Amino acid sequence: MKTRAFIVLVCLTATIPLVAAPAAPTNVAATDGTHAAKVAITWKAVTGASSYEVWRATSSSSTSAARITTRTTLSYDDTSAAAGTTYYYWIKARNSTGTSNLSSSDSGYRISIVFQEHGSSYGYDQYTDATHPWKSVEAGKSDSVRAVITPSAPYKVVSFASASSSQVSVSPSTPSSASQVLSNQGGTSRGTARINVRAHGNDLGYYSGAVYRKIQRTVAVTLVHEQDTDGKGANQGYSSVDISDSLIISDLQRVYKQAVIEWTVVRRAACTVNFDLNNDGKIDVNTWMSAEMQKIRDICGSSHQYNIFLVSKPSDGSSGFMQANQKYGFVHVENGNAKTVGHELGHGSGGLSHTPSDSENIMYNYSSSTKWRLRKGQWDRLNP
């Protein structure tokens, strides 16, 4: 019997990729101060790539780079870049087979324009919009704002222009330093204008100017004492605490110049009257207008545009009381101060409400001597 030999042939076939890993991208470019909100990165397309990785570092060494995003496009806007910081960017190309090496890098940065209060003649409101503040100015007058450019190197490519120079004109049009004081000249009529900031043809930001005609207002201030008529009960008569005219004028000027309003203070002779009708040794301010407040108004009031009565010992421990759009107001000096006069006139002359969420506002519920701001909406109410 013959033995038969069988030979089994085994064929090993090497796996050959159909698609090769892509090459590293070229022409990587990052913007240098072109935008205020981003660094724009672009690169050239790589044959066979399906996506791209963007890598970033704050030094030119790729060993410190970190991947920040993966894109299928040929550009990326890095909005997380901090203003004024120079970043280095690399790109990797990817497909189903693999990832390329890092490309050559390019550096870029985003510019920052921050506006700051500078002029003290009129108002400045960064509360309503912290990024785009408001600046008030009197018609035909000027006041200033500071623009701070970060980083300082690209300030020469920045420009300033008013969207309506007939309302507010700005100068200079190009800065001479990275911390530029801008003069804002008001036109002849009430109105607003946006002051635009640009670089390389792109908008970097803006602030707005508001022009008001000056308004003159007068307030008569009267110190009111309680008269003792019977020597009985809690009411033995008392003298109220006073505030000097110089303090009142100083605070009114500081507050109301923001809305281009100038107050004249007329000091009237002290008024002594038996207003304590319930004989409790206090003035009743629990309601507007109580019988005791009416008695002061009727005896001590005047024909002046507005009246403030300085009277002590309020029934509720308040610092003052004046309803919206009223001619008469009361300030209780042992609890308030000259700033309280400004607070109450905000109610009476402009119909302003309390601002519990804006603690630096003079219309905050607690009228402290450190709170004196007015905002754009309040400027409009006070100087319509």
Image (cartoon, rainbow, N blue to C red):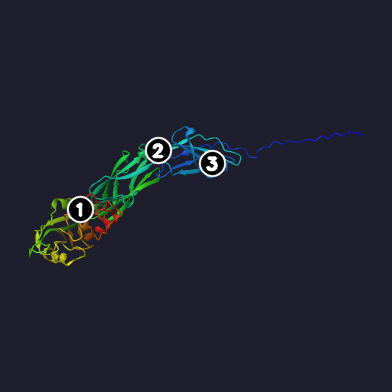
Q: Is residue 122 above or below residue 157?
A: below
Q: Which of 172 and 138 is in front in this view?
A: 138
Residue occupied by mark 1? 339
Image quarter of the N terminus: top right
Q: In this view, does 354 lie to the left or right of 16?
A: left
Q: Quadrant of residue 272?
A: bottom left
Residue occupied by mark 3? 52
Q: Do the residues labelled 1 and 3 touch (CB within 8 Å)?
A: no
Q: In this view, does 177 lie to the left or right of 311?
A: right
Separation of residues labelled 2 and 3 (CA atoms): 24 Å
Indicate which disc residue 85 carries: 2
Residue 54 image offset from top left, x and y in percent? 50, 40
Q: Which residue is drawn at 42% across and 39% down?
A: 109
Amino acid type of the residue that numbered disc 2 sits on in the rendered structure: Thr
Classify 10 Å Cα crowding around label 2: few (below 14), some (14-19), many (20 and above): few
Mark 1 vs 3, N-terminal side? 3
How many marks on residues? 3
Q: In which quarter of the image is residue 223?
A: bottom left
Residue 231 image offset from top left, x and y in percent? 7, 63
Amino acid type of the residue that numbered disc 1 sits on in the rendered structure: Lys
Q: Is mark 1 on a helix, strand or loop?
A: helix
Task: Give the mark toward the camera: 1 or 3.
Answer: 1
